[in-house]
Image (cartoon, rainbow, N blue to C red):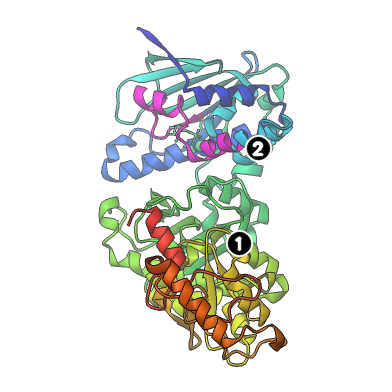
Amino acid sequence: MTEERLSFQAEVSRLLDIVAHSLYSEKEVFLRELVSNASDACDRLRYAALTQPELSADDPNLKVRLLVDKDARTLTVADNGIGMNRDDLVENLGTIARSGTAAFMKSLDGAEKGDGKKDVNLIGQFGVGFYSAFMAADKVTVLTRKAGEPTGWRWESDGKGEFTVAEADGLPRGTQIVLHLRAGDDEYLDEARLGGIVRKYSDHIAIPILFGEGEDAKALNSASALWTRSKSEITADQYKEFYHHVGHAFDDPWLTLHWRAEGALEYTNLLYVPSTKPFDLFDPKRAHRVKLYVKRVFITDSAEGLIPPYLRFLRGVVDSEDLPLNISREMLQHNPMLAKIKAGITRRVLSELSKKAKDSENAAEYDSFWENFGAVLKEGLYEDYEHRDELLKLLRFRTTAGDELVSLEQYVARMKDGQDAIYTISGDDLDTLLRSPQLEGFKAKGVEVLLLTDPVDEFWMPSVGVYDGKPFKSVTRGGADLGKIKGEESEKPEEKTPEGELTDLLALLKLTLSDAVKDVRKSERLTDSAVCLVADDNDMDMHLERLLKQHKQ
Ligand code: ADP
Ligand code: MG
């Protein structure tokens, strides 16, 4: 039987080098990663077996086993899940496909120049999936056979740039990850130590994690899906670990929502709002990653229509009692029950966000959410008409009034006498906006202006048009009329240019600039600068014009 020798993708080699040389104190997280993979593999087999029951018929009770060989100094994480064939092995255990690992590598690019310690701590935060096995092992052997396929495979590597793949006979269905432990890592041969790690990180896993061979092997976890347990039985740490597992995340959840919908449709939800921004938030697909289960069976983590795109930052699971188990992923989308579940989730999530937004004692907490996901939430203003009013209340803005984030309600409450519009200015970044001459007159009169830096602002604002009867109006438009507003500034009549001279100047400017501008007008908007460019009331906002030019529209 021939053995192939292959090289890791360059990035994997770099990652493995860091993993192997880190003296990371929480290296125990490797077990969390391997158990998580084993559980995913069982989930995938269970789903495949819905339409092809023969795949799991010979060994239907899915489980994970931890096996130790004290003489050989090996720890094996074994599952009877979906398994891998040769191509799966090369693709999955030779490249960096996984999003979390890619994010980890990216974060290293920033950290590497500093002290080496930072890299090391990041490993624990991110969890680098399968490759974290090399934290505890100097050689890893993977024995695996894919469900429904006759041939088994053996993958092996010392984590130094290359791995081998060869056929292997007589393997059971599923995957065994054999860790040849590094010197000094004997603690991972100890049942009590392993049990402790499993309870700490993996108790929420729905299938049994057993220690040892045979029927009387001992279960190390509770083996019931976390979301099916009652809230009072779940600790904050367990919620958090589950978030890490289900969301492939490494931060703390900002919000944890666990509820059961009862009535015409029954479904259980365990949803999280992250506390940091996932790096693919603005991916053009705008896909969410909430996992859909039907009666505890994992169906898909890409059910289109389950979560509105403007809530795509949510992580977690939805488990339906009513959807048919044998529904294909493609048919799901058209099932009317899915739309009802989506409506229920949207209502609940928005109402929880509203509660947080209203809680003025913890304003900073809501602000941190807003900084991460505000730009995504704004998409709902033109996509979800039904919840527009609710969404408008969730908005926060930077303004010319100071550093604090301001709601529309606050803005309107402090509008000046005679002010009948909500003034805005758009641009790429706050600093440039704040230096804009178009703001001078507004600043002088103490009229607050919303500073808009998200591209999405150019879309929702024209679509929404007014808030509380007040139109949104860009200060870069000619009509922004400061004359009517009673401001704070004192009159300085002695500095006024005589009317006649001004008319002459305007005529001269118009003549000189000819076709470059539409018109030259006197204005109250400037106090320090002599001139500024503005858009005509009927023309496109200047920032939007620039944005569209960038995209060659
Ligand atoms: P992730 O779990 O985030 O995808 P990992 O590095 O942990 O990333 O694993 C990489 C891939 O290797 C998995 O997506 C999966 O396809 C495959 N894999 C790892 N462990 C197993 C296993 N026990 N059974 C089947 N496939 C596995
Ligand atoms: Mg994994």
Nearest to the observer: residue 126 or residue 468 = 468
Q: Secondary structure at mark 1?
A: helix
Q: Quadrant of residue 411?
A: bottom right
Q: What kind of residue is marked 1? A: Leu
Question: Is 416 included in the stretch rendered in magenta?
Answer: no
Q: Is residue 156 left or right of residue 383?
A: right
- Crowd rating for badge 2 (residues with CA inside 10 Å; few <14, some 14–19, many 20+): some
Residue 517 in the image: x percent, y percent?
41, 69
2 and 1 marks in contact (CB < 8 Å) = no
Tell me the quarter of the image containing the C terminus.
bottom left
The residue that disc 1 covers is 430
- Crowd rating for badge 1 (residues with CA inside 10 Å; few <14, some 14–19, many 20+): some
Nearest to the observer: residue 330 or residue 453 = 453
The residue that disc 2 covers is 122
Question: Is 97 included in the stretch rendered in magenta?
Answer: yes
Q: Quadrant of residue 352?
A: bottom right
* 180 is higher (above) or lower (below) than 371: above
Nearest to the observer: residue 497 or residue 75 = 497
The residue stretch that appears in magenta: 78-107
Residue occupying the point 63% across, 64% down: 435
Residue behind label 2 places its C-beta within 8 angstroms of ligand 1: no
Quick check: can you spot residue 255? no
Q: Secondary structure at mark 2?
A: helix
Residue 9 in the image: x percent, y percent?
47, 23
Query: Nearer the observer, disc 2 or disc 1?
Result: 1
